[in-house]
Amino acid sequence: EEGSKKKNDIQSVAPWLSNHPEINRGNDVVQFVLASAMESLDENQDESKDRLYLNSAAEGNSFALARVGSLLDEDTLDTKLENEALDILEKLRPFSSLPEPIKRFANAPGKKTDVMAMRFWFEASVRGNPLAQRSLADEIMFQASQLEYDEDSYVLAAIFFALAGQQGDEEASESLKRVLNA
């Protein structure tokens, strides 16, 4: 039954996309575009579209990585997909290889999905995604504000605000000014 539901979800999108031969062959771009199209229909296709986003993210697609980060931040992935997301993160970059501020936040009180979101945004950020860079920097600043002063966190946030700002994200540029004046 789950397979037929997934097929029906995908079929509600344009046939040229829903029947694309590369969907199940690891083509991260096709998977991301199809997931985005399904999301725009807003027809309760969460698991099918979320699985496509995860598959695309597992291939390193920066847009999918950023979107999965946002889904985790919004707390909309079910537990099974959260576990799959954690496996993807560990394959992309082991926890031990993350910047220290992100590792420190993992030990802070709060939802485990907050740190998972940061990790997805980090992966998208190092691949050049400005939305992920700003999202990560914003979350770093938020997490740092909840804990004792941590200069490394502010430096890391400033780096990602600057990277996003260099790509034309004016909001990130404004946030960078606030971080530097703090």
Image (cartoon, helix red, strand yellow):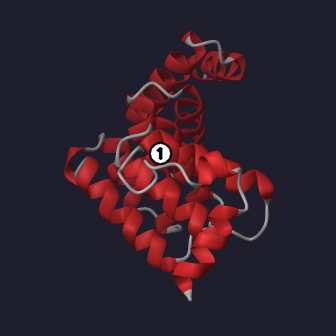
152 or 82, nearer to the observer: 82
* Relative to 170, residue 13 above or below: below
* Relative to 24, residue 151 above or below: above
Secondary structure category for the residue under label 1? helix
Q: From the top left corner, tell me how far across and down residue 71 is, in percent.
A: 60, 58
Q: From the top left corner, tell me how far across and down residue 135 is, in percent.
A: 59, 38
85 or 44, nearer to the observer: 44
Task: Write the residue at 70% across / 18% down.
Answer: 174
136 or 43, nearer to the observer: 43
68 or 179, nearer to the observer: 68
Q: Residue 73 lies in what quarter of the image? A: bottom right
| Quadrant of the image containing the C terminus | top right
Q: Residue 75 lies in what quarter of the image? A: bottom right
Task: Write the residue at 46% across / 52% down.
Answer: 23
Tally of marks: 1
Task: Write the residue at 64% across / 12% down.
Answer: 168
Task: Write the residue at 21% across / 44% down.
Answer: 97
* Relative to 142, residue 52 above or below: below
- Which class describes the residues within 10 Å of circle 1: few (<14), some (14-19), or many (20+)? many
Left or right of residue 51: residue 90? left
Q: Which residue is mark 1?
A: 65
Q: What amino acid type is highlighted by mark number 1?
A: Leu
Q: From the top left corner, tell me how far across and down residue 102 is, in percent.
A: 38, 47
On the question of residue 33 being in view, the answer is: yes
On the question of residue 144 being in view, the answer is: no
Q: From the top left corner, tell me how far across and down residue 115 is, in percent.
A: 45, 56
